């Protein structure tokens, strides 16, 4: 993890670490040196100073240490995570849907960058997320906005039924997909729970 990522993480989540001693392992030797000392490059020096001031302000004792990359495989893998399965709709489309079936209380599959409602759930810890992993939550008391990754559509449908939740579910029109028969099988529990279908 680079120095900018450390700076961002501390500014986003530092309040959770207030008054704590934090041991931070990095496989990037230059980053460790810059955080511990400084840099002759103004931009990197500014990042280092920002980290120092953030830790000073919220009383974090940051102890950064270099470790070889082969001992940092879990964190290294998470830092490179990118999903090719994520879906998103445009803001105008969401606003149209919000006038039809909203207002929506929560976006269950989002990040701080693409959320459509003030409250949202995220896959990983995220700035402002009210919970990580939406399937650990009871959806029953909310009007839920759901644009799940394709691989989670079936699980999403089951969770809607389990929670007896009010929701708008956005999925691609894909009759050969595994979730399609679950959604559109005649006389199924799912179809009995569906009030309206909009194709767009």
Image (spheres, rainbow, N blue to C red):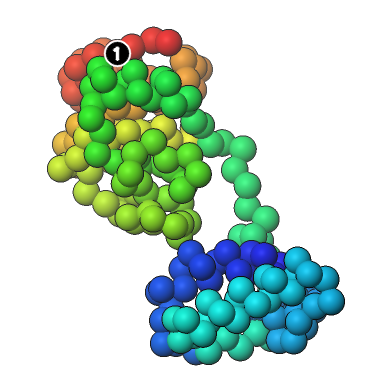
Please state the horizontal and vertical placement of residue 97, each as a whole percent of the image: 32, 20
Q: Quadrant of the C terminus?
A: top left
User: Is 194 situated left or right of 63 in this image?
Assistant: left
Please state the horizontal and vertical placement of residue 64, each as a whole percent of the image: 65, 84
Q: Give whichever of 75, 127 is nearer the camera.
A: 127
- Secondary element under disc 1, as helix, strand or loop, is loop
Please state the horizontal and vertical placement of residue 174, each as a whole percent of the image: 49, 17
- The residue tagged 1 is 197
Q: Quadrant of residue 101?
A: top left
Question: Which residue occupies the extreme right position in the image?
Answer: 40
Residue at left 78%, top 70%?
Answer: 42
Q: Quadrant of residue 93?
A: top left
Picture layout, residue 150 above or below residue 2 = above
Question: Which residue occupies the extreme top position in the image?
Answer: 199
Please state the horizontal and vertical placement of residue 146, each as a whole percent of the image: 35, 33
Q: Is residue 69 visible?
A: no
User: Is 80 situated left or right of 107 in this image?
Assistant: right
Residue at left 71%, top 67%?
Answer: 2
Q: Is residue 122 visible?
A: yes
Residue at left 57%, top 86%?
Answer: 62
């Amino acid at each position: 993890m680079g120095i900018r990522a450390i700076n961002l993480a501390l500014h986003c989540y530092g309040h959770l670490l207030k008054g704590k001693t934090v041991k931070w392992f990095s496989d990037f030797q230059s980053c460790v040196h810059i955080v511990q000392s400084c840099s002759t490059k103004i931009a990197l020096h500014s990042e280092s100073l920002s980290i120092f001031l953030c830790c000073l302000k919220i009383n974090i004792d940051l102890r950064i240490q270099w470790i070889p990359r082969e001992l940092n495989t879990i964190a290294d893998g998470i830092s490179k995570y990118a999903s090719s399965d994520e879906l998103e709709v445009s803001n105008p489309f969401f606003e149209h849907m919000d006038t039809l079936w909203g207002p929506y209380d929560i976006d269950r599959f989002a990040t701080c960058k693409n959320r459509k409602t003030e409250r949202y759930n995220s896959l990983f810890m995220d700035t402002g997320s009210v919970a990580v992993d939406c399937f650990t939550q009871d959806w029953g008391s909310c009007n839920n906005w759901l644009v799940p990754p394709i691989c989670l559509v079936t699980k999403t449908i089951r969770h809607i039924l389990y929670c007896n939740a009010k929701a708008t579910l956005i999925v691609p029109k894909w009759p050969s997909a595994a979730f399609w028969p679950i959604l559109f099988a005649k006389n199924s529990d799912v179809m009995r729970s569906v009030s309206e279908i909009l194709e767009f």
